[in-house]
Image (cartoon, rainbow, N blue to C red):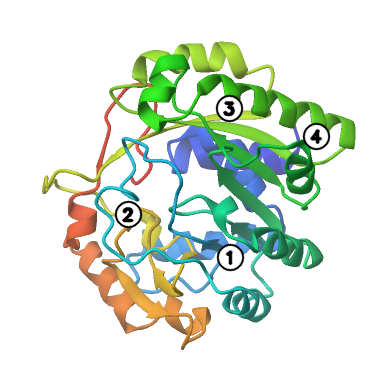
Amino acid sequence: MGIKSWFFRLAAKYYLKKPEQAEFIETRYSSLNGIFKQGINQICYILHLDVAPFITSIQFEVTNTCNLKCKMCPVNYTMTRKKTKMDFGLFRKIVDANKGVEYYLMFNWGEPLLHPQIFDMLGYLKQKKKNVFITTNATLLDSEEKMKKLLTAGLTRLTVSMDGFDKTYEKVRGFKYSIIKQRVLKLVELRNSLNSKTKIDLNMVVFKETESEVKRFYKEWKLIVDRLQIQPSIDFFTDKDVKRPRCKEFYRGNAVVLADGRVTVCCGDYDAKMVIGDANRTSLKKIWNNAKIRKLRQLQNKGIFPSICRNCNEYRTELVNPRFE
């Protein structure tokens, strides 16, 4: 184990208290510059300051439309904002204006492969030699040609959402499990034959319907894909005002750019209730420490949270740590 891996294991275990996140954060902050910037942001969190100087990652919601109606997802149930696709010109403008950002996640709400220019976007980031993750439900990867195109797009990690097995998966996602299983196996086979450096991961959202299948998830897939991730679902459908601890999302340096160009603080803000600016009009650098987000930080440092945070109710299970604590 190298010094950097050792450092990230310690950080994940003792600072985040989430040892399972070590590999993920090591991939995310791959350079000393990235580590330094995130370290400064976290010092600001520890000191209860109202600034976080650096944007360390950008999360693009390339579209908030989806072809599935998953039980735990608000996109096709309670999301009220207009369904749209990100303008490619805006995407390029943001990338060009944030040259120091090393990590991009091409997913928030919606299925990114529905965007007609998704491969142009990935190609643009490949030219810039960025560290790029994408998450997909894989339902649109219906040909070897599309799979090869994705595997040669310069992705660092490709994550496929797989919530359960067989009837459970089909009940949750409304799609045939056997088809997704074969596509994941084909992706791994093609990745190896192409000598692609893209890591292939699987992600399971844990809630009542899937909790009993977590052990099987690890048993069946741990030797096939590069990483398995489980995360608790967020209960978006009930109003439970719970007492929240301070949240690192305000300081993590992850700017979430929604499909229409508005910017929010947290990926969990599915209906844009905490918008802090509009990237169509203002640079991310100006937005990230503007008066709106500084006020949010000041309030949360006093234990006062907006409704989206107060009602951030994650599924509780001993199998996985909460994401937003």
Residue 180 is marked as 3
Mark 1 nearby-residue class (10 Å; few <14, some 14–19, many ≥20)? some
Q: Amino acid at mark 3?
A: Ile
Q: Earlier in the sequence, mark 2 or mark 1?
A: 1
Q: Amino acid at mark 2?
A: Cys
SS type, badge 2: loop
In the displayed structure image, the side of residue 187 where residue 316 appears, left or right:
left
Q: Which residue position holds label 2?
A: 247
Q: CA distance from mark 2 to mark 3?
A: 35 Å
Viewer-proximal residue among 128 and 325 = 128
Mark 3 nearby-residue class (10 Å; few <14, some 14–19, many ≥20)? many
Q: CA distance from mark 4 to mark 3?
A: 16 Å
Viewer-proximal residue among 51 and 170 = 170
Q: Amino acid at mark 1?
A: Lys
Q: CA distance from mark 2 to mark 1?
A: 18 Å
Q: Which residue position holds label 1?
A: 37
Horizontal and vertical percent for residue 154?
A: 77, 52
SS type, badge 4: helix
Residue, far bottom: 281
Q: Earlier in the sequence, mark 2 or mark 3?
A: 3
Horizontal and vertical percent for residue 74?
A: 30, 48
Residues at discs 1 and 3 in contact (Cβ within 8 Å): no
Q: Earlier in the sequence, mark 4 or mark 3?
A: 3
Viewer-proximal residue among 205 and 118 = 118
Q: Amino acid at mark 4?
A: Arg
Viewer-proximal residue among 179 and 185 = 179
Q: Which residue position holds label 4?
A: 191
SS type, badge 3: helix
